[in-house]
Amino acid sequence: DSYDACSEWFQTGKINLLYNNMKQYSWSVHPEIGEMDVFNGKHALEVAPRASWIKISNPTTKLLNLYLYYMGTAPTAKYPKINITLIDPINKTIELEQQIDPLLVLHMRAASEYHLVKGSYLGKVAPGEHFLFMKPAEEKERPFRLTGIALTEQGGHTDQNMEGLF
């Protein structure tokens, strides 16, 4: 048996994780043209300009692979790169540090703008509770928008970036 725990709020807006210094964002009207867009009724957590965190838990006795899902754009970056730090609060140790770039990598020439959910593999998470700290590395047009987190025994590819409209 393998273990999977996904917390995805892009479709429902229901967030079942403890978080701090983040606010829930819901799309309803396209801000530039004042009309409904493809993201109508979709949801994300916006990371504040200063550090925000979300609590995650690995209830197993195994190392699990951690994936983050967030909004990305192409051909220009409208969301900031974000510095990620995973902390074990019991041992007060940093378990991983990484920077995520929400710029979408297109394998074709972009004739128009793309705005999709992107996923990134972060690394292995030990059993127990952890705090995932997020801090923007730069200022951009929009705040970094987190749409989900997954802990799973499957995957674990360090070069795995998944892009698509979920």
Image: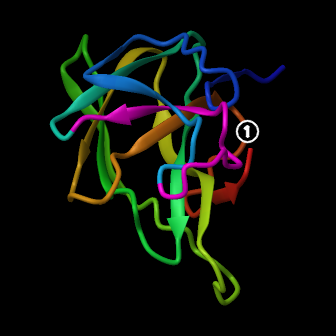
Q: Is residue 35 magenta?
A: yes
Per the image, the residue denoted by label 1 is 154
Residue type at mark 1? Answer: Gln
Q: Residue furthest bottom?
A: 109
Q: Nearer the viewer, residue 9 or 33?
A: 33
Instruction: Please determine whether, in this image, residue 61 is positioned above or below residue 124.
Output: above
Left/right placement of residue 98 relative to residue 156 reads left
Which of the 4 image quadrants contains residue 158? bottom right
Residue drawn at x 55%, y 49% is 34
Q: Quadrant of residue 150 in the image? A: top right
Residue 137 within the segment the image draws in magenta = no
Q: Which x, y percent locates residue 135?
A: 23, 42
**Residue sitting farthest toward the right:** 1
Most frequent secondary structure within the magenta stretch: loop
User: Residue 72 location in percent, x, y?
Assistant: 52, 57
- Image: magenta residue range: 32-48
Q: Residue at x 73, y 51 (%)?
A: 165
